[in-house]
Amino acid sequence: MSTQTTAHTMAIQASRKPSAFTLERFWLYLILCLFAFMFLMPIYVMLVNSIKPLDEIRAGNLVALPLAPTIEPWVQAWSQAQIGVQATGLKPYFLNSFLMVIPAVLISTALGALNGYVLTQFKVKGGTLLFGLVLFSVFIPFQIVLIPMARLLGELGLAGSVKGLILVHTVYGIGFGTLFFRNFYAAFPQELVKSARMDGAGFFVLFWRLMLPASLPIVVVNIIWQFTNIWNDFLFGASFSDYSSYPLTVALNNLVSSSTGVKEYNVHFAGAFIAALPTLIVYIVSGKYFVRGLMAGSVKG
Amino acid sequence: MTSLTIENVYKQFGQTKILQDISLDLADGEFLVLVGPSGCGKSTLMNIVAGLEEPSAGRVTLGTRDITYLPPDERDVAMVFQSYALYPNMTVAQNIAFPLEMRKVPKADRQAAVQKVSNMLQIDHLLDRKPRALSGGQRQRVAIGRALARSPSLFLFDEPLSNLDAKLRVDMRAELKKLHMRTGVTTIYVTHDQVEAMTLGTRIAVLKDGLIQQLATPMELYERPANLFVAGFIGSPSINTAEASVDASGNVCLQAQPVGVRIDPVHVNKTVIFGIRPEDLVVDSDGVIDATVSLLEPTGAESYVLVDTAFGEFTLRMPGPGQFNLGDKLKLSFPAAKVHIFDKASEVRLND
Amino acid sequence: MKNRWLPALVLSPSLLLVGVCVYGFIAFTFYLSFTASTILPNMTLAGGENYARLFSLSTFFSSLGNLGLFATLYIVISMALGMTLAILIDQRIRAESIFRSIFLYPMALSFIVTGTAWKWLLDPSIGLERTVHLMGFESFTFNWIKDGDMAIYTVVIAAVWQTSGFVMALFLAGLRGIDNEVLNAARVDGAKSWRIYTRIIIPQLGPSFISSFVILAHMAIKSYDLVIALTGGGPGRATWLPSVFMYQYTFTRNEMAVGAASAVIMLIGIAVVVVPYVRREMRLNQGPNA
């Protein structure tokens, strides 16, 4: 692909006269930079205003750099801000989110991998229908399961707990995971599988020694995708947790939407940043894996 | 109609030289084949003539126009690609008409051209289909039709038969030749297959490492290859070679046996390469070469006989099923007029 | 395979969980929508009463109206912007990966974070309006977020900002999948850049259009977090979407059955968009190693 692109590059560049070449390119870069500016603006504003003292924000320009930068809003957001009835800052809820995310991601990835493996390598009765049902389940509005899920969690004694959230996110992460792995394993070279079977590989050996190792990139993609989705979830958090088990998103919203008292914008921005950091870091570090995760839902051309 | 001139064209990417000092003159209506192994630069040269790439130096002239830096659409050149490159979202008729549409040819004229071309290529029953519903051979005809519809001054074919299966390739080869005889459009045809080159071209340019090794008619290439590479490239099975020496009078000798060819005595004591084509070796009880049959390859109409000699393994070409068995001892001779002598170091032809 | 039950056995936990927690729950909620539940589920059937009530509520209608407006603008603008960005980036830009990262990073953020950022960005007292005032343009007004009629458009802005990068990524993948030689053929045939895009490239982007539409539409219907964080559903109920309606009626107003009914409506809406796509995928993927 890259040789093709290079040749393509050379080809297209070659046929334009030099002067037209630079003018067009100039406009191109200008427009792109304009868009980039618009996309970066909100996060810039968030960052810059999270280190301004409150009076500067009120008196001044949202885009201006801080005159007297301070990390006080961050400290506030992290450990002192009023969330609901307690002034603990976001720290305990940050922890809740982590405790919730990690098991859910691991379990749903493991199940997803196994499911994808079974659905593609074995004749399962109604396999295509199952695939359709799983695919559809990924799109449902979660409002439709809120009421019965609340009931179920109540019956299991998990209502308002982090464990309950783990269960919820695991269950609804299975669908995605199954799809990712199914698509990958469906394209897996069958000759390798046949040859392994002829060599005597059984069900688990085939999975554990051949297919899973080959699908490590997809495992990474799945983990990243699930992590991002579960960390960023709000609806389930708002519906199934109580004061002690709020995930970070719910706590943040609580912090920002409190209608009483002075609006501490800088603390809000700092809090939003804290909530955004884990997934942003994952995004920056994982680069193309993140993109692959996005693509997994798209139609094959 | 117009003639094409390529003058001193160079192409390099950074340090890599793709083409070096290529000069070609095509007469009007000529069918020039560019042939050579992968990486020899033939596709790059084609792209330069088409306008898809620019040369690093040199000039390309079509008729009276200097087209070196013109964009492809202003060159009046049509191209048939190796993968046919049909527009997947358009029907066959739309594909063929597309270049005419780009030139703002009125609809009625476009339709007439599409009809004419599709009749000629026998694809008129496919006009409403999309490319994905066509076979390889059909797609190829559509690609040719699209190029033909424009009545261009120059046709470029980039390995058009490579993606077809063997039988179809042979059939299409003949069709292309007939097409050229009918339309008489100047054509450059790129291939790596020397049989295609020999059968289709009025002249052939053999390329290697960005240089033209020889530019000549097919028979000239076959009978008087300019260097060892060309000798080995043209002709199948390929030419038999052996090291030989030159005596003081310029006689070429295979292990002290003169082969009946004289070259310039200045080459005395140099090692030269002696070459003889499989079809020119004759089984002769008075022959100078001792050979033992090591392998038989009958192909039906003829057989290839591999023999071990003091100079290495040689191949003979014999009509019919052949009368030899493994292990038979033979003596071989050859007409001196069919011998090719090359300098070992420079690989250049030394005899006339 | 020695043990023919093993594959089915391995699938069963997931099948059970998804079967119960997705389809079982859907059935439950569906049933619930026909009962007389208020604070807690009440299993006595009440016929279609809840749906009647649903469609008599102006809040529900305005939610639907908001959704229609929001979804249309959101989908159209995101697709246009996404496709444009993809085409621009496909022009062999030098800092391509940097630009791509910039356009895509909002997808990594929670809608709550996005809502929080844009909430204050668009707030007249400290955000855009005030900033422009401070630059000297005293007469500039931008108080959409506080304006009942215009607030929904702020949701569109924030949502488009969040997901255009995703649409861009989809179209970029589609563009990169187009055979280079076809483009070369078009250039030799005399097509200029603009024509190549409109006649050859964009028609081949069908799959990208379909994917982005399905995903954007279903995200629009599911939008909840963004609205809550950005406007809280307000001012008043000006930015209520069916998702907000459902949550409010179920958990705050204790009209569970009505809430359930609204959830069913949401599901139907999504099913209309998604089921054709799912069926197409099923057709293209006929079981293992077909």
Image (cartoon, helix red, strand yellow):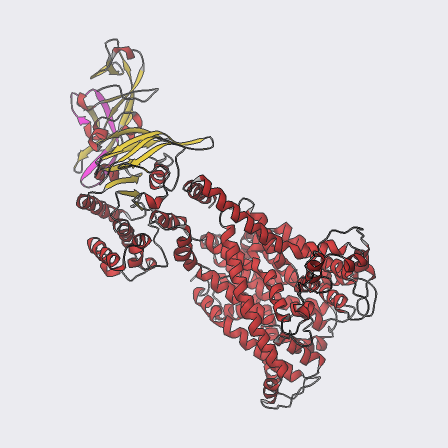
Q: Give residue A287's position: percent from left, percent from top.
A: 60, 51
Asked whether residue A223 appears in the rendered view, the answer is: no
Location of residue A60 by image quarter: bottom right
Is B283 inside the magenta-drawn segment?
A: yes
Q: Which residues are magenta?
A: B281-304
Q: Is residue A146 left or right of residue A179?
A: right
Q: Quadrant of the C terminus of chain C?
A: bottom left
Q: Give residue B109's position: percent from left, percent from top.
A: 24, 57
Q: Is residue C198 left or right of residue B294?
A: right
Judge whether C197 appears above or below B214 on screen: below
Asked whether residue B252 appears in the rendered view, the answer is: yes
Q: Is residue B55 left or right of residue C226?
A: left
| Closest to the observer, B251 or C57 | C57
| Closest to the observer, B106 or C273 | B106
Magenta segment main secondary structure: strand
Q: Give residue A182's position: percent from left, percent from top.
A: 52, 61
Q: Is residue A218 left or right of residue C42?
A: left
Judge whether A264 appears above or below C249 on screen: above
Count of all numbered marks drawn on residues in the image: 0
What residue appears at the point 39 percent right and 37 percent down from the top-left corner? B54
Location of residue C245 by image quarter: bottom right
What residue appears at the point 56 percent right and 76 percent down from the top-left corner? C267
Is C164 inside the magenta-drawn segment?
A: no
| Closest to the observer, B189 or C98 | C98
Q: Give residue B97's position: percent from left, percent from top.
A: 29, 55
What residue appears at the point 64 percent right and 54 percent down from the top-left corner? A40
Judge whether B87 appears above or below C10 on screen: above
